[in-house]
Amino acid sequence: MGKKIQVMIVDDQKSIRGFLRSIIESIGAEVVTEAENGEIAVKNYKLYKPHLVLMDINMPHMDGMEALIQIIKLNPKALVIMLTSLDSGDMIQQCIENGARNFLLKSNPPDEIASEIKESWADYVADLKAG
């Protein structure tokens, strides 16, 4: 893979951030920053310019949907994967329409989350190469 994939984790629950960090590290990527709400996520995105963002939807101050919209404005090609504990078709559709590349349920087993992240990264890189 060469250079490690740099990831930002955004979730208001510290325990979930830790859970996601262990998954990210298990696939050979590195967590460059974390944020507990959308406001901090947008600031950290500008500062760290991570390759991939894993972001919860429901958070205080600024939710993940608004942060997604702002990050996509900063970088229309940003790779953002949304996370939630609610399996809602409307929410999935809204995330995709606003620029998210994928949508994961936090309740999925860790190996499934890891697999989805790797697959999203591979698709993203292929899309970039295709132009």
Image: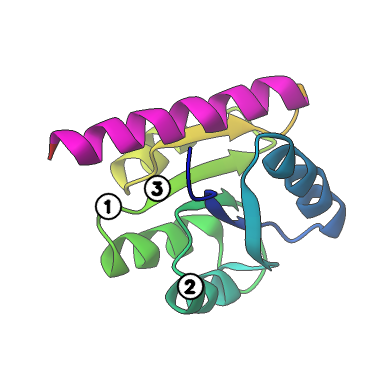
Q: Nearer the viewer, residue 79 or 55?
A: 79
Instruction: Name the image colouring.
Output: rainbow
Magenta stretch bounds: 110-130
Q: Amino acid at mark 3?
A: Leu
Q: Residues within 10 Å of mark 1 (few under 14, many from 20)?
A: some
Q: Amino acid at mark 1?
A: Lys
SS at mark 1 in the image: loop
Q: Are marks 1 and 3 in contact (CB under 8 Å)?
A: yes
- Residue 13: quadrant of the picture: bottom right
Checking the image for residue 79, the label placed there is: 3
Name the residue beneath numbered marker 1: 77
Checking the image for residue 42, the label placed there is: 2
Q: Residues within 10 Å of mark 3 (few under 14, many from 20)?
A: many
Please give the name of the residue rendered at 60% of the width and 27% of the height, measured from the top-left corner: 87
Q: Work out whether mark 2 precedes mark 1 in sequence or the reverse, and give the earlier one.
A: 2
In the rendered image, which quarter contains the C terminus?
top left
Please give the name of the residue rendered at 76% of the width and 21% of the height, measured from the top-left corner: 109
